[in-house]
Amino acid sequence: EYSHWFLDIIIPVSFTLALYWISLLLRNSLVGKSLCALGECSLTIFFIHAAVLYVFREYSIVGAIALALLLGWIIQKFSRQNRILSFLFLGIYKKETKQQ
Protein backbone atom coordinates (compact mmCIF):
# COMPACT_ATOMS: atom_id res chain seq x y z
CA GLU A 1 0.00 0.00 0.00
CA TYR A 2 1.20 3.48 -0.89
CA SER A 3 0.92 5.91 2.00
CA HIS A 4 3.16 8.87 1.21
CA TRP A 5 0.41 11.45 0.78
CA PHE A 6 2.58 14.13 2.38
CA LEU A 7 5.19 13.78 -0.40
CA ASP A 8 2.41 13.83 -3.00
CA ILE A 9 1.52 17.31 -1.80
CA ILE A 10 4.93 18.78 -0.96
CA ILE A 11 6.78 17.83 -4.17
CA PRO A 12 4.28 19.31 -6.70
CA VAL A 13 3.80 22.45 -4.60
CA SER A 14 7.56 22.98 -4.25
CA PHE A 15 8.11 22.53 -8.01
CA THR A 16 5.27 24.95 -8.75
CA LEU A 17 6.72 27.56 -6.41
CA ALA A 18 10.21 27.04 -7.87
CA LEU A 19 8.94 27.54 -11.44
CA TYR A 20 7.04 30.64 -10.36
CA TRP A 21 10.14 32.04 -8.64
CA ILE A 22 12.31 31.34 -11.71
CA SER A 23 9.74 33.01 -13.98
CA LEU A 24 9.78 36.10 -11.77
CA LEU A 25 13.57 36.23 -12.01
CA LEU A 26 13.50 35.89 -15.81
CA ARG A 27 10.64 38.33 -16.32
CA ASN A 28 12.74 41.34 -17.34
CA SER A 29 15.70 39.52 -18.88
CA LEU A 30 16.39 38.78 -22.54
CA VAL A 31 15.58 35.11 -21.95
CA GLY A 32 12.24 35.99 -20.39
CA LYS A 33 11.30 38.34 -23.21
CA SER A 34 12.30 35.73 -25.80
CA LEU A 35 10.19 33.08 -24.07
CA CYS A 36 7.30 35.56 -23.92
CA ALA A 37 7.55 36.20 -27.68
CA LEU A 38 7.64 32.46 -28.39
CA GLY A 39 4.71 31.95 -26.04
CA GLU A 40 2.64 34.42 -28.05
CA CYS A 41 3.48 32.41 -31.18
CA SER A 42 2.82 29.01 -29.62
CA LEU A 43 -0.35 28.25 -31.60
CA THR A 44 1.34 29.02 -34.91
CA ILE A 45 4.38 26.97 -33.89
CA PHE A 46 2.03 24.12 -32.99
CA PHE A 47 0.44 24.25 -36.44
CA ILE A 48 3.70 24.07 -38.40
CA HIS A 49 6.10 22.09 -36.21
CA ALA A 50 5.07 18.63 -37.42
CA ALA A 51 5.49 19.58 -41.08
CA VAL A 52 8.89 21.18 -40.48
CA LEU A 53 10.13 18.25 -38.41
CA TYR A 54 8.90 15.80 -41.05
CA VAL A 55 10.59 17.64 -43.93
CA PHE A 56 13.88 18.08 -42.08
CA ARG A 57 13.87 14.73 -40.23
CA GLU A 58 17.09 13.58 -41.90
CA TYR A 59 19.00 16.66 -40.76
CA SER A 60 19.86 17.79 -37.26
CA ILE A 61 16.87 17.58 -34.92
CA VAL A 62 18.10 20.67 -33.06
CA GLY A 63 18.24 22.62 -36.32
CA ALA A 64 14.77 21.42 -37.29
CA ILE A 65 13.37 22.52 -33.94
CA ALA A 66 15.07 25.91 -34.24
CA LEU A 67 13.69 26.26 -37.78
CA ALA A 68 10.18 25.38 -36.59
CA LEU A 69 10.41 28.03 -33.87
CA LEU A 70 11.78 30.64 -36.27
CA LEU A 71 9.19 29.91 -38.98
CA GLY A 72 6.40 30.00 -36.41
CA TRP A 73 7.58 33.38 -35.21
CA ILE A 74 7.87 34.75 -38.78
CA ILE A 75 4.45 33.43 -39.83
CA GLN A 76 2.95 34.94 -36.67
CA LYS A 77 4.36 38.37 -37.54
CA PHE A 78 3.10 38.19 -41.14
CA SER A 79 -0.29 36.79 -40.19
CA ARG A 80 -1.06 39.79 -38.02
CA GLN A 81 -0.82 41.94 -41.17
CA ASN A 82 -3.03 39.80 -43.43
CA ARG A 83 -6.72 39.21 -42.73
CA ILE A 84 -6.82 35.68 -44.20
CA LEU A 85 -3.64 34.54 -42.48
CA SER A 86 -4.85 36.11 -39.26
CA PHE A 87 -7.98 33.98 -39.43
CA LEU A 88 -6.14 30.77 -40.40
CA PHE A 89 -3.28 30.92 -37.92
CA LEU A 90 -4.60 33.06 -35.09
CA GLY A 91 -8.35 32.55 -35.24
CA ILE A 92 -8.93 36.30 -35.42
CA TYR A 93 -11.81 37.27 -37.67
CA LYS A 94 -12.31 40.94 -38.41
CA LYS A 95 -15.11 42.10 -40.58
CA GLU A 96 -14.18 44.68 -43.14
CA THR A 97 -15.82 48.01 -42.46
CA LYS A 98 -17.00 49.99 -45.44
CA GLN A 99 -16.10 53.63 -45.43
CA GLN A 100 -18.85 55.95 -46.64
Image (cartoon, grey):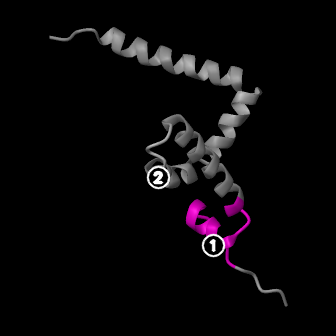
**Position of residue 42 measured from the top left corner of the image (x, y, whole percent):** 57, 47
Give the amino acid type for the residue marked by disc 2 in the picture. Answer: Val
Q: Earlier in the sequence, mark 1 or mark 2?
A: 2
Which SS class for mark 2? helix
Circle 1 residues within 10 Å: few <14, some 14–19, many ≥20: some
Q: Residue at x 59, y 23 (%)?
A: 20
**Circle 1 residue:** 84
Which SS class for mark 1? helix
In space, the residues marked 1 and 2 are separated at their CA atoms by 25 Å
The one nearer the camera, 22 or 49, is 49
**Circle 2 residue:** 55
Q: Quadrant of residue 80?
A: bottom right
Q: Is residue 53 a member of the stretch shown in magenta?
A: no
The one nearer the camera, 46 or 52, is 52
Total numbered circles: 2
Q: Residues in magenta? A: 78-95
Q: Residue at x 77, y 86 (%)?
A: 98
**Position of residue 38 measured from the top left corner of the image (x, y, whole percent):** 64, 42
